[in-house]
Amino acid sequence: MIGIFDSGLGGLTGLCELRRRLPLCDIVYFGDTGRIPYGTKSASTIIRYSMQDMAFLSTFGIDAALVACGTASSTALDELRQRYSIPIFGVIDPAAKDAVAVTRTGRIGVIGTPTTIKSGSFERAIKHLDKSIEVTAVACPLFVHLVEDGFTTPGDEVTRAAARRYLEPLAGKVDVLILGCTHYPIISWAIEEALPGVRLISSGRSAADALADAVGKTQSGSGSVRCYVSDSPEGFEAAAGVFLDGIDVGKAEQIDISKY
Ligand code: DGL
């Protein structure tokens, strides 16, 4: 069984990719909807939250985990790996590897939450693979709220204007852009409009691929998916549908994450 967590529903984009790659693996998903956003909080708070999220998932006896959150992957991965002996995948290294593999100009853009960008995690991972690559990183704090609040319909004027404003510094400078937050693929239409011709790398997809490649052979369940959230599950199905591209994950159950 694979455990996945995110600060909210954005990690469902990773779940979706994993389900496509490994249709028979059993998945348990936790979205910390009661404490989102993580992306504006300090590293120490995110580490504490991530430890609790992982402790909850561990009660299911998971044998691998996906930290489907750019912010938690940027700040808490080392601590999680020190505490748990199962394979734990974050979104940083897999996305960096995919971006380095496809850039033609050697100029890669990264967008993410303020905490992710401040951490320099993607830049480090890219430079580790190829020192010569030029990285431009931009924080896009409003994007998570636009996605969680449903401003996702292609053509939405608010999202379009936010994307134009945030992405202006990247226009004409990069040929590949890492969506360093798992919420962002939902508004990729606005990102593509603001940066025409730029190749987008979904960090959740890269991470799900890396995880599937590493542990796929050991996962043979019944393809079950259980979802848990830390705030009211009311409206979960409708909200989750935006991220799931037709995959049915049923209802979510609310848990008290402070107990873990
Ligand atoms: N999904 C989280 C990430 O990938 C962003 C949401 C948040 O700020 O909590 O960073």
Image (spheres, helix red, strand yellow):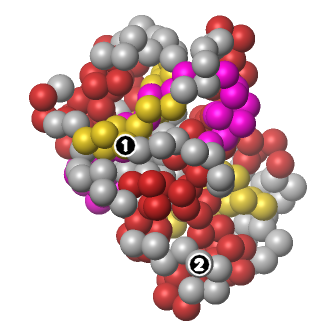
Q: Can the viewer see residue 227?
A: yes
**Residue at 30% in and 32% down:** 53
**Residue at 41% in and 37% down:** 227
Q: Report the front residue among 103 and 68.
A: 68
**Residue at 39% in and 72% down:** 149
| Magenta-drawn stretch contains 31 | yes
Res 54 → quadrant: top left
Horizontal and vertical percent for residue 240?
Answer: 48, 55
**Three-letter code, disc 1:** Ala
| Badge 1 element | strand
What residue would you read off at disc 1? 252
Vertical side of 150 occupied by 155: above or below: below
In the drawing, what numbered circle is on residue 153?
2
Q: Report the front residue among 87 and 28.
A: 28
| Magenta-drawn stretch contains 38 | yes
Q: Is residue 141 left or right of residue 176?
A: left
**Residue at 25% in and 41% down:** 254
Q: Earlier in the sequence, mark 2 or mark 1?
A: 2
Res 145 → quadrant: bottom left
Assess disc 2: are there few (<14), some (14-19) or many (≥20) residues with their C-alpha within 10 Å of its C-alpha.
Answer: some
Horizontal and vertical percent for residue 37?
Answer: 30, 57
In this rendering, the label closer to the viewer, 2 or 1 = 1
Q: Can the viewer see residue 136?
A: no
Q: Is mark 2 within 8 Å of ligand 1?
A: no
